Image (tube, coloured by chain):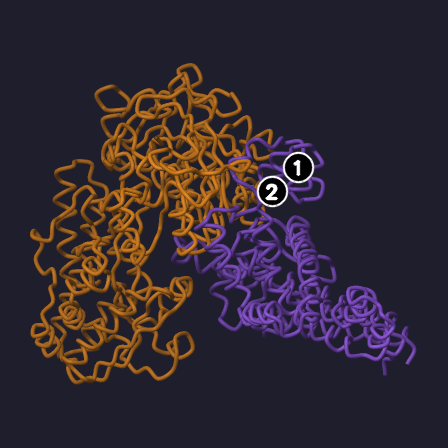
Chain colours: A purple, B orange
Amino acid sequence: MKLWIYVVRRLILLVPTIIGLTFLVFALEHVGGTSLFLAQYINPHLTGTARQKLVEELTAKFHLNDPVYIQYFYWLAAIFQGDMGTSTTIGQPVATGFVWFMPNTIMLTIVASFLTWVISIPIGVYSAARRDSILDQSVRIVTFTLYSMPVFLIGFAIFLTLGTTWRLLPDQGNVDPILLPTIPDAWFDHTTAVSYPTHILAIDAFLHGDWTVAWNALLHVILPALALTLALLAGIIRILRASMLEVLEQDYVRLARAKGVPERLVHNFHAKKNALLPTVTSYGYLVSSLFGGAVVIEYIFTFKGIGWWTTVAFLNGDVGVVMGSTFVFGLILVATTLILDVLYAFLDPRIRYE
Amino acid sequence: MTLGTTIAVGNFGIVKLRNVVPAPGVITELVNSPGGPFSFDPQIDYETTGFEVVVNTQATLIFYTGNSTTNWFPYLASDIPTVANGGITGNFMTYAFHLRPDVAFSNGDPITAYDVWYSTVRSILFQGGRPGTADWIISQYLLPRNAPPFFSPFTRVVNTTNKAAAFTAIMNGVTYDNATDTVTFHLVNPTPPSLFFTAVSDPLGMGVLDAAWLESADAGITFTPDGFLAYQDQAKEGNYNTLVQFHPVASGPFQINTYVPSTAVVLTPNPHFPGIPNIPKQNNTVIVEWVSSPAVAYQLYVSGQGDIVTLLPPPYYKALQPLVTAGETQIYGPFPSITEFFDVFNVNITTSLMASDIGPGYNIQPDYFANPLVRQAFAYAFNYTNYVDNILGNKKYGFNFGSPYCGVIVKGLPYYVPPTSLTGCPNYDLAKAKSLLYQSGMYNVTANFPFIVPTGDTTDFTAAIVLGQALASIDPNIVMSPVFLNFDTIIGLSVPGANPMPIYFLGWIADYPYPSDYTDAMYLEGGTYPGPDGWDQAYLNSLAAAHPTEAALYTAQASAFHSLTTQITAADTEPNPTLAAQKYAQAEQTGVGLYMYMYAYQATGAWIVKPYISPYQGNWGYQTNPTIGAGADSCFFWWVKG
């Protein structure tokens, strides 16, 4: 099949995929009834007829007496009009919350991705090159352990050890709160704790020459990024090692050795880039793990990203945020896998899509 | 001594410094309360998380002295009005407060009687706000119920039909005089100072905002009937003024510097708060962090990232004991709060809704608990001592988390009646419980029903299991099984005439420290609990006909409930303290005798603080007022670090 036809077909399939995903989440959000949702809008002190009246108003406003699928279509219609609703967690439109928090999540995932690559490539290559050595055995044990650990456990372990016990690095928030009063109003909104222009405090502080805040904010990124990295790199190392081992058995590699090419060059010049190909594509498909991990890690470290916001919203019954996050993450995931599939086809001419 | 390392700001390192106060000048409080506050607007917020910020940033005319609930000191007022000094009229219907001249808002605007008046009008107009505001507390004294605008809590004061009359009533309810800088409240009924002052000193509702700033922030009031009508919309969720909601100009000792939504707030000293007797000028920066879980709050606290930690559940008190022994933390308490917890009987169960709202398989008569002897039997089957010692955990965790009590006017409130002065306070006696059940005529009657417990409250879930076992030992036909329901679901199901919950566990946190807040909510017909639990005079009157064999029993019950309502109404409006005490005691005795509740425990409070944290002037009374959260909400202006 021609690639462009494949891309168009995937784009068309994106619509029912997103609808299916968001409907499933919407239905799950409503399984427990409406009490948690309504609790955001009703003060427990409100009782009697005043409460009843408010419940009636809210039921009418949010169509809570309609079947779930009808409520869903109201939500979908609002989405197509660009209205994601208001987040009761932050008191702002959901769309505003994405503008505020998404940059932090993107930064965290970029840092974690960078660290993952920087750490996993040399370890994976070296481990494969020293197959069954003590180093290789050690790497396999560690990666197997990390691979088996759920990401929240890795996060808590780092929080407890490097954070609260050894106090090596900050473990909560995006910056030390005591620095907040020192940040000028010119680029920091003290009502919402949002910095400008990028909404990433470390970068904005750097741009405005506030080195103390920039450095402190950067330190706050390290532990959550490290936790996310550890959750990812085990899988990457394992894939890279396996891929490298396979490539090292190929005829062209044997030929290179036979011609007297130094082993170091055999690994780095002949074997590594071919071994990286499946690793790159596998990494892409781990994007879901990356964002899913970010949700958990951000909550543990109270790192102000989409993941933290979505988790708090979920616990508070802030349905608009949960649905908005599902929608956005769903789009990102589908788009990412499509891009990777296309990239893979370009990188490997043998790939053809049916 | 050991070494620490410092990177940028803050202390990081494997080891800690001893006998050195970390981060001097900064007090950090960790609150185990995920989600953060609702608002910092004193006329909008009505929950404890936001209250803690409001009490520190928004001043009131008067405030409680130490841990007293009956003594006040002048805060924004220059003195406490009395009949003797002419501040209160002899009929207790007019209260005049003169403002002290030396206080100002955080933006430098002087605080005047005009601002107090403006804030009071705003409070009245917001008392019908959504999702519910505390403004009804002051409004109830200033607006008539039986004449326009027919005040009703949580209902908008001004509507299209009454706007002229409502406007007049509001403008008559509170006035100001710029010449004398005096604000005057004109009450609709005689009200003793011990009651009215509880409303005036409540930051939620009566926290004073800067009128000029409100108008500059597009939150000003137009003083016409239509202006009042329109202004009420600003109290509806979705229409709040964001700046006023999260960053209002301060009248108190602190101002809000930065708010990190749902996570933290940084308070810095109000530069224009000069310090007054009882509240010194502040020098500390305060950081309040709302933490997602008790485990995280605990870890942050013991690792030195917090000076104070609040709302930790009981098991952590045991974990903290080694630190107390090592001198690395102190737990001050227990001290009494006026928060009480109890089990509620529903005397008119809407059994048709049980299957859909709670679950299938239950079988109980709708009027099972309408029989007073059944309720009494249940009350005598509850092992109160075992509950507080082993289930609540006083003996288990070595700390007094709560005390048994009897009657709704708990210790710490004015006109408290000790259980020894009451007849009929139940104690654990299974033999008596069985005998009562026999007498009720409900022995050997099938009763399979749920005991509703708020989700996550494993303590009372366990207590319900134990009670169920005790009841089954008396009568195997009683099958009572605990069920978790979300707290908001429980509130949502508490609808008059449509409540499917036969018995459920809940509590009462005071809006103001006066018996009426308790008696009206828990004993009065139509009150917060009696309303949805079937305590309706007409219904009670009908029970005698429905149960001719026990007609005398039900007739007496209906008569007692009628007397209770009358007694409470008389007590609430009695200005003479001696007579008020007698009337509340009478009402309390009647209420206890009706066995409307099983009284579980009166909560205590405790402060968990680092050893370098102490209360103002070394007096713990400043941080143990039961009205100010009792160990959960700090008055930061009364904490000293170092």
The residue lying at 11 percent from left, 60 percent from top is B425
Counting labels gives: 2
**Can residue B157 be seen by looking at this rendering?**
no
Q: For numbered disc 1, what is the local secondary structure? A: helix
Labels 1 and 2 within one chain: yes
User: Relative to residue B483, is residue B35 drawn left or right?
Assistant: right
Label 2, on which residue? Answer: A217
Q: Where's residue A310, x and y in %?
A: 58, 59
Label 1, on which residue? Answer: A205
Which label was assigned to residue B303?
A: none
Q: Where's residue B379, x and y in %?
A: 16, 67
Q: As shown in the figure, which amino acid type bears the numbered disc 1?
A: Ala
Q: As shown in the figure, which amino acid type bears the numbered disc 2?
A: Ala
Q: For numbered disc 2, what is the local secondary structure? A: helix
Q: Nearer the viewer, residue A188 or B480?
A: A188
The quarter in which the C terminus of chain B is drawn is: top left
Which residue sits furthest right?
A: A2
